[in-house]
Image (cartoon, grey):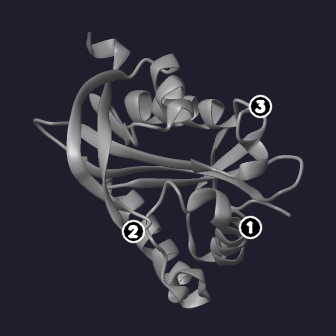
Amino acid sequence: MSVRNVLIETPRTQLCVLDVHHADAIIAYYRDNAAHLNQWEPKRSPDFYSQTTWRWQGRNAQLDFERGTSLRLLAFDRMTGKVAATSNYTQIQRSPFEACTLGFSVGAAHQGTGLMFEVIEAGLNYVFNTMGLHRVMANHLPENKRSAAMLARLGFEREGYAKAYLQINGVWRDHVLNAKINPAHV
């Protein structure tokens, strides 16, 4: 499979901004990984897996990227051509904040391989050095030790704990709050 609109290359992936042409690939990713991801993500309605939903999401992701309000990346595995992970830098706010929120997921087959670290490290490099952001915030469930360890390895620091922060699989869940400051700004 040929990947469209490659923005960033890593040793194992090609990262591109989600667009309308990725509908089939992202639907396959979420369907293939539903059992793995449902413990970490919001409850999904049946239309979440539709072409209409993902073509709309793709159009919006492109518009938001052009406006500079979000960067929704798909990580395509170089070997298989399939989506292996996602990393989304959303809620980008400019002056004086210059910050965003990072959300991410990795397919079950790639969990524990360091691929998510590779993808986020490349994304952070882009948002800090190309987009010029000052701060990236990323949160995780308290029991998600893999995400906690990865974020710490990437230089994120724990900043707090939020009660009933986000609805995960239909339940309001607490989250650990983390952030990383652009190394060029410290």
| Location of the C terminus (image quadrant) | top left
Residue behind mark 1: 32
Q: Is residue 122 above or below residue 171?
A: above
Residue contact at pointers 1 and 2, CB within 8 angstroms: no
Mark 1–mark 2 Cα distance, whole angstroms, equals 27 Å
* Image disc number at residue 63: 2
Residue behind mark 3: 11
Q: Picture quarter containing residue 185?
A: top left
For disc 3, the neighbor class at 10 Å (few under 14, some 14 to 19, many from 20) is few
For disc 2, the neighbor class at 10 Å (few under 14, some 14 to 19, many from 20) is some
Left or right, residue 92 beside residue 121 = left
How far from the left and from the top, in percent, is residue 111?
A: 70, 41
- Which residue is located at x 69 percent, y 65 percent? 29
Q: 176 or 138, which is in the foreground?
A: 176
Q: Picture quarter containing residue 74?
A: bottom right
**Residue type highlighted by circle 1:** Asp
Left or right, residue 6 beside residue 128 = right
